[in-house]
Image (cartoon, grey):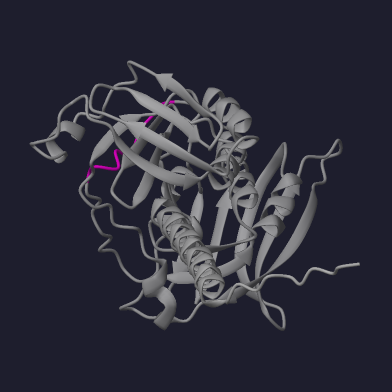
Amino acid sequence: MKFRAKIVDTACLNHFTRVSNMIAKLAKTCTLRISPDKLNFVLSDKVANGGVSMWCELEQENFFSEFQMEGVSAENNEIYLELTSENLSRALKTAQNARALKVKLTNKHFPCLTVSIELLSVSSSSRVVTHDIPVKVIPRKLWKDLQEPTVPDADVSIYLPVLKTMKSVVEKMKNISNHLIIEANLNGELNLKIETELVCVTTHFKDLGNPPLASENASQDRNSEQMAEVHIDIRKLLQFLAGQQVNPTKATCTLVEDFLYMYFKDEGPETISVMDPEIQRGTSSGPRGSQMQSSASAARGLEILYQFVLHDVSAEVKETLQHLEEVESQQVTAMEASVLRTEFRNKRRPFTEKPTHRN
């Protein structure tokens, strides 16, 4: 396995740094998938308790001036590395105003992702700062668990409001409830709602718009005003909103029966070429070792696809409520049985008059 890459454009370097900072805020560890034409950051949290999964895709030709890799074999020309997100983020913090950034897969008694940063200097000589980030090579038998999530037929897809506004609303709701209900319909209406025994709070967003394919994918019998809803862990959603560093121009929310999918179309600092998540992407048919790429310019589009899957916790809530109802029913039944037993004992107990004492 071999991998080395280089970034020389300042805009591309800053954008790559922001992506790394976002990953570090979302999870402690992540998987870096390296292929001949793409880099992917993958988060695959357990979704049993409202976990978050993410598939972040970067076209390597839009970021790197040089890119060369060889996978584990000719048939499986990919590399999967597990690393600590914070280590990569810290290493890239020193890359501000850097002249160049080099990333290389090395072996220094253990696998490392070596990040070399060439810094600007007042004199003609340059300074190079090197960070060795320990990584774990993921075996091929585990690759199947780290593939791009497949999106089932959506109930409703809708564009999200400004993420900063949404974050501000969710932060206030967090103080009242641990679970958030997200409702949306095909009229471009979105509701953020929390419900407790004492209060019900709903924030309404209107005229957000729906993606062009949303109405075609939705059920033919669905009324455009009918709301689809999912229940999610409000802390996980807030963690995701707080970790945003790239300010996408378009954010799409897709509601399915058991999941909530969020797509983020991020545009580069200059000319834009946005990848539509609805378009099926082609597979690479190049040789095992990719050739050196020509210099990437900030004027080219930076194509990034983010996909977050927040598990619907409504089933868990329903099970908890059902369990509480069963417990309460059992307690009532036990109390009724206790009362009946007491009454039965009182009926069987003979009445005895207390003796009176005469003087």
Q: Nearer the viewer, residue 304 or 320?
A: 320
Q: Nearer the viewer, residue 99 or 85?
A: 85
Quarter of the rendering occupied by the C terminus: bottom right
**Residue 311 occupies which quadrant of the picture?**
bottom left
Q: Residue furthest right?
A: 359
Q: Position of residue 84 (x, y in %)?
A: 66, 63
Q: Residue furthest front?
A: 359
Instruction: Left or right? Give the position of 285 relative to 298.
Output: left
Residue 1's place in the image compared with 213, above or below, is below
Magenta segment's dominant SS is: loop
Q: Residue at x 48, y 64 (%)?
A: 336
Residue 119's place in the image compared with 50, above or below, is above
Tell me the magenta residue range. 271-279
Q: Position of residue 28 (x, y in %)?
A: 65, 60
Instruction: Left or right? Give the position of 187 relative to 273.
Output: left
Q: Position of residue 339 (x, y in %)?
A: 53, 65
